[in-house]
Amino acid sequence: MNGAAFAWTKRKIGRMVNAGAWMGLVLGSGLLAARTLVGAAEAQSAQAIADVPKMMQESDCFSCHRVNQKVVGPAFAEVAERYAGKPDAVSKLVGKVKNGGAGSWGELPMPPHPQLTDAQLKTIVEWVLAQKSKPSSDNKPAEGAKEYAYKLPDGRTLALNFPVFTANDHVTGSVFHGWEKFNSYCFRCHGTDAVGSEYAPDLRHSLESGMSKSQFITMMMEGRPDKGMPTWSGFFDVDDADQIYQYVKARSVGLVGPGWPSD
Ligand code: HEC
Ligand code: HEC
């Protein structure tokens, strides 16, 4: 973000996002800082991230994995469960993360990681294998557990599983950050304000015609390089992807208009 836009947005954002997210934004001139400090509500997971081997934070693992939730790849706690007590688990998984590939959990491939040494991979895999599923009471509410009903401009009422607006009618910090990221990184192909362009599809239309959130995030992280869609894993993590999804979804149903997403 350049300095001028930053100063201009500062006052307004201050009202819209919680102090923690704002901190993330202040420190967020590097994406990594924004990533590890994602707001007070996420303090716990930020703490958990602090215990992760450093090379894992610096690599792309958290673009596609979470500890307790399947995203593009399996939840690390589930991986740990599957390989518990298997003597060759570490060497098998070191090879898998290094060379990439599909077939153990589904059709989607994991990209190879040739830049990590065997020693680094061993530390990482041992960390993965030490993860445990959280008791369900600690988990965030399952997706879709909570609903937010909105009246659309065309008169329909629609229930979403994330909030678009805060109590005082501003867009949430997540939707705002999604707007910011979309219009920094996606707009040059998918059009300013997500209206599509001759280079790439109108993503509002993709979501309106049935693309799910998980398909959206998978496409974003895996990319489709042969068709000109870049791979965003390693650059964005799962929380960033969530925010971009929320913004595009809010655009697709008409709750957020073009331009600065305010009231
Ligand atoms: C672009 C998305 C993506 C990224 C980035 C990614 N993974 Fe994966 N990962 C996957 C997918 C998809 C699978 C399931 C592959 C399969 O079914 O065989 C997977 C599977 C795994 C497994 C289980 C493998 C098995 O055979 O059971 C481990 C362990 C793992 N990933 C660790 C990592 C680590 C560590 C990193 C970072 C160095 C990482 N992943 C980065 C998508 C990703
Ligand atoms: C360099 C151009 C380019 C950029 C930048 C880009 N995309 Fe794409 N994207 C494409 C193209 C081209 C396609 C269509 C690929 C195909 O034909 O399957 C696509 C397809 C997609 C799709 C699937 C749409 C559908 O209906 O199948 C999603 C989701 C997507 N992009 C998300 C994103 C997001 C999110 C960003 C920003 C983080 C982004 N893209 C940035 C070029 C781009």
Image (cartoon, rainbow, N blue to C red):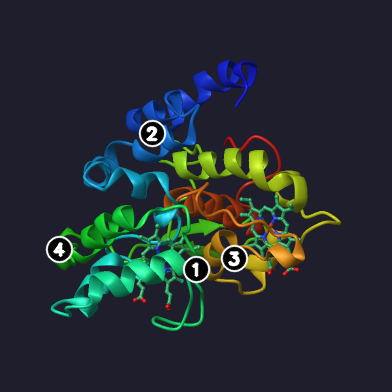
* Mark 3, residue position: 219
Please state which of the two labelled residues, at mark 3 or mark 2, is closer to the viewer: 3
- Residue at x 53% of width, y 62% of height: 217
* Mark 4, residue position: 137
Asked whether 235 or 200 is in front, the reply is 235
Which of marks 1 and 2 precedes in the sequence? 2
Label 2 vs label 1: CA separation? Answer: 24 Å
With 127 as the anchor, is 102 left or right in this view? right
Label 4 vs label 1: CA separation? Answer: 24 Å
Whether residue 72 is visible, yes or no, is: no
Asked whether 227 or 214 is in front, the reply is 227
Which of marks 4 and 3 precedes in the sequence? 4
Type of amino acid at the residue the image marks with label 2: Ala
Type of amino acid at the residue the image marks with label 1: Ser
> Which numbered disc covers residue 87?
none
* Mark 2, residue position: 21
Verify CB contact (< 8 Å) between mark 4 and mark 1.
no
